[in-house]
């Protein structure tokens, strides 16, 4: 596996890959790799000649009160995991290399961000979009691989790719879970033993919502109320949101129809966890 640490070197390599006609799959991450990230890499390896994974904890997507400093990092372990997974190029730039000029432009996302994490984390998706525009231009991938665990991110990146005419196909990968249902996340290490036990209930809460829909409930407010009640009963963490929207447009629904997202965010003592399920409803 090649390790590249500067954008100049990555850009040079990306141009060579283009010239030699290799298809390039790209997996952007913030590192502290787990099985979720590795699933994205496996999918990219299957579908492309070259897989580039980036590891970059992007300060622009963290709010002032958020966990940028405390975000877990382990670059040596990440390198081993990426290499064993079969990643061809690991791009691990420094902040000073990526943001090496004054911020002469500002990316502001206007759609799909006034709800869910966009509402709770103002500016988050502006930061995500800024780094992805930069990484797309540096790596020039044919396909980018992203997890549905961050479904709102998928919705925003889908619109970013179309709006800026990036010739990149967005491939989404199902959420990878622990055996008890908890969605894999770099932030799970911040759960206390007690919180970790409770956290399995997040997925159970989503499954409860799904069952209600399968049994014919079509009123989003009733489902949201029952899922919230379940979380409050079984989890000591506090609810940031439990919401239902259309997907990927993220519009408010009067009645459950077509493709919807049931999403939640819960704050534990040191970690804020998110999870969601997408449900297809026949009319
Ligand atoms: P992160 O390092 O948390 O920014 O995540 C990098 C990529 O991995 C994003 O596209 C995430 O959606 C994806 N990802 C994170 N956790 C999971 C998971 N449990 N299952 C599938 N994809 C995931």
Image (tube, rainbow, N blue to C red):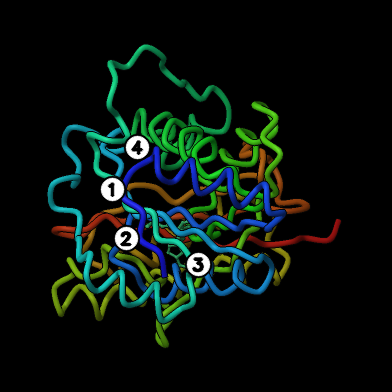
Pick the residue in front: 183 or 115. Answer: 183
Tell me the residue that label 4 is attached to.
120
Q: Which residue is mark 3?
A: 206
Residue drawn where x is 30% and y is 41% of the image: 58
In contact (CB < 8 Å): disc 2 and disc 4: no
Q: Which mark is residue 5?
A: none
**CB-based contact (under 8 Å), mark 2 and mark 1:** yes
Secondary structure of the residue carrying numbered label 1: loop
Real-space Cα separation, disc 4 to disc 1, in angstroms: 19 Å
Residue 28 coordinates in the image, percent (x, y): 45, 53
Nearest the camera: 32 or 53?
Answer: 53
Is tag 2's residue or tag 1's residue first in the polypeptide sequence?
2
Q: Is residue 109 left or right of residue 194?
A: right
Between the C-alphas of marks 3 and 2, the distance is 27 Å
Say which residue appears at 49% left-offset and 54% top-offset: 263
Category of crowding for the residue at label 1, using alpha-carbon neighbours closer than 10 angstroms: few (below 14), some (14–19), many (at least 20): many
Find residue 31 and name its label. 2
Q: Assess mark 2: CB under 8 A from ligand 1? A: yes
**Please, is residue 148 above or below residue 235 in the view?**
above
Quarter of image, ligand 1: bottom left
Q: The residue tagged with tag 4: helix, strand or loop? A: helix
Disc ID at residue 57: 1
């Amino acid at each position: 596996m090649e390790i590249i640490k500067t954008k100049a070197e990555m850009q040079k390599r990306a141009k060579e890959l283009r010239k030699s006609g290799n298809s390039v799959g790209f997996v952007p991450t913030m590192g502290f790799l787990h099985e979720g990230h590795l699933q994205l890499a496996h999918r990219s390896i299957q579908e492309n000649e070259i897989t580039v994974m980036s590891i970059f904890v992007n300060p622009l997507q963290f709010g002032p009160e958020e966990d940028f400093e405390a975000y877990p990092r382990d670059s040596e372990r990440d390198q081993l995991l990426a290499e064993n997974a079969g990643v061809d190029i690991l791009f691990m730039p420094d902040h000073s290399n990526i943001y090496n000029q004054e911020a002469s432009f500002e990316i502001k996302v206007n759609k799909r961000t006034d709800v869910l994490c966009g509402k709770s984390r103002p500016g988050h998706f502006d930061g995500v979009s800024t780094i992805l525009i930069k990484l797309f231009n540096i790596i020039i991938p044919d396909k980018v691989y992203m997890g549905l665990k961050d479904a709102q991110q998928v919705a925003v990146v889908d619109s970013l790719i179309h709006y800026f005419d990036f010739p990149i196909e967005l491939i989404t990968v199902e959420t990878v879970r622990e055996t008890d249902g908890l969605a894999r996340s770099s932030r799970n290490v911040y759960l206390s033993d007690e919180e970790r036990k409770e956290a399995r209930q997040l997925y159970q809460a989503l499954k409860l919502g799904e069952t209600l829909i399968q049994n014919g409930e079509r009123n989003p407010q009733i489902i949201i109320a029952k899922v919230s009640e379940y979380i409050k009963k079984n989890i000591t963490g506090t609810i940031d949101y439990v919401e239902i929207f259309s997907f990927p447009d993220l519009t408010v629904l009067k009645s459950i129809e077509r493709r919807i997202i049931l999403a939640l965010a819960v704050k534990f003592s040191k970690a804020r966890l998110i999870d969601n399920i997408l449900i297809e409803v026949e009319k």
